[in-house]
């Protein structure tokens, strides 16, 4: 039972920091605005590590490498903490495995961030479409949803035409 409690605490603490650093990288990569509650929270949570790292790893090519490296190091430490909790013996093989697994976990976390952004954007579009989070959510989801948005009008047209034809046919039958 103590093991489960420690695992929960490790997951919560590391998850909070790693997801914030990864969200910072994604927001800067996709040019999402930071003048909103999410951007300000992400900045406040990660500035302590990202600003010193920027001296070693400046941004290049439009990417904030310091944020990404911070997220990756945090993910490696998270996995190492969980492995040590499970009484794992650290060897070169385990460390190499954790380094690669951290990359996969960051990809998984990126997808979860995207799914969460789409879900929140869908809910807020019903409640507060022009709220303070609309800009950042649109920036996070625009590139993924743009191809779908191009196809949706065709799907709507495909639904409208056959249904209109069926409605007219039924109306003629029952006249």
Image (cartoon, rainbow, N blue to C red):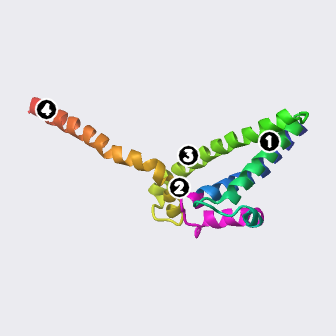
The kind of secondary structure element at disc 3 is: helix
Instruction: Evaluate if marks 4 and 3 touch, with contact meaning CB atoms under 8 Å apart.
Output: no
For the residues labelled 3 and 1, the Cα–Cα distance comes to 23 Å
- Counting from the top left corner in percent of width and height, residue 175 is at 8, 33
Q: Which residue is mark 2?
A: 140
Image side of residue 39 versus residue 18, left or right: left
Q: Which residue is mark 3?
A: 115
- Magenta: main secondary structure: helix
Q: Which residue is mark 4?
A: 169
Disc 3 residue crowd, few under 14, some 14–19, many 20+, Cα 10 Å: few
For the residues labelled 3 and 2, the Cα–Cα distance comes to 10 Å
Who comes first in sequence, dot 3 or dot 2?
3
Task: Find out whether residue 167 is within the magenta segment.
Answer: no
For the residues labelled 4 and 3, the Cα–Cα distance comes to 42 Å
- In the rendered structure, which segment of residues is drawn in magenta? 27-49
Image side of residue 113 versus residue 71, left or right: left
């Amino acid at each position: 039972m103590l093991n489960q409690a420690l695992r929960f605490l490790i997951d919560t603490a590391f998850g909070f920091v790693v997801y914030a650093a990864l969200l910072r990288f994604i927001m800067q990569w996709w040019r999402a605005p930071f003048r909103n509650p999410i951007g300000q929270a992400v900045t406040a949570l990660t500035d302590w590590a990202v600003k010193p790292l920027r001296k070693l790893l400046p941004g290049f090519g439009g990417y904030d490498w310091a944020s990404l490296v911070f997220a990756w190091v945090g993910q490696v430490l998270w996995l190492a903490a969980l492995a040590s909790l499970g009484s794992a013996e650290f060897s070169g093989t385990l460390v190499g495995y954790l380094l690669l697994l951290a990359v996969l976990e960051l990809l998984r976390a990126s997808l979860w961030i995207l799914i969460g952004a789409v879900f929140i954007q869908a809910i807020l579009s019903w409640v507060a479409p022009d709220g303070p989070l609309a800009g950042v959510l649109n920036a996070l989801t625009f590139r993924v949803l743009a191809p779908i948005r191009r196809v949706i009008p065709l799907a709507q047209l495909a639904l409208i035409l056959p249904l209109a034809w069926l409605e007219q046919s039924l109306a003629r039958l029952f006249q």
